[in-house]
Image (tube, rainbow, N blue to C red):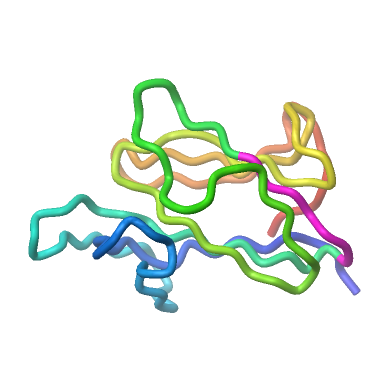
Amino acid sequence: MKKSCQIAVLALAALVAATSSSVPVTSAPHPVSTTGTDGSADYMTISITNVYGSQLSLSFLSDAGGPAPVGNLSATVFPDNSPIQYAFPTGWAGRIYVGSNTDYRSSKIEGSLMGPPDIDVSYVDGYSAPIT
């Protein structure tokens, strides 16, 4: 069985409340920009599913001066075969470190929502878990 951590960019959606459980989850094939009727900012929901075969950790680093993702941003450990979701506001840029330990040598999901959404995987500084 292939071990990896799967990421899925689900959709841009306006948040109704500042919790990840209130973010609409859809299976849109491409991010879709929406703005709430209250004029709230756009958010991109990123779902990460651990199919690595053992627990993985996540840690977050947002670029200085930018908005923070919505959700529990403390270093997170999640078991195998479990999903987790975070909402990232327009203007966010940063990294999500993924691995059994999370430091600068970890596999990274990097992203920028400073213009058109740009999400990628980086193994440049290190490799800790495959990400698909």
Q: Residue 91 appears at what percent x and percent y? A: 30, 37
Residue at horizontal 78 percent and vertical 65 percent from the top: 79
Residue 35 in the image: above or below residue 99: below
Name the side, left or right, on which 113 lies relative to 81: left
Residue at horizontal 66 percent and vertical 67 percent from the top: 49
Q: Name the outermost residue toward the bottom.
A: 27
Q: Residue 37 appears at what percent x and percent y? A: 8, 65
Q: Quadrant of the C terminus?
A: bottom right
Residue at horizontal 28 percent and vertical 61 percent from the top: 17
Q: Quadrant of the N terminus?
A: bottom right
Q: Count every numbered label the image shows and give the total.
A: 0
Magenta span: 53-59
Q: Is residue 22 magenta?
A: no
Residue at horizontal 33 percent and vertical 47 percent from the top: 89
Observer-nearest of 123 and 39: 39
Q: Residue 67 appears at what percent x and percent y? A: 34, 35
Displayed quadrant of residue 66: top left
Residue 90 in the image: above or below residue 24: above
Name the side, left or right, on which 41 lies relative to 8: left
Observer-nearest of 74 and 101: 74
Displayed quadrant of residue 38: bottom left
Q: Is residue 54 magenta?
A: yes
Q: Residue 60 appears at what percent x and percent y? A: 58, 38
Q: Name the outermost residue toward the top.
A: 64
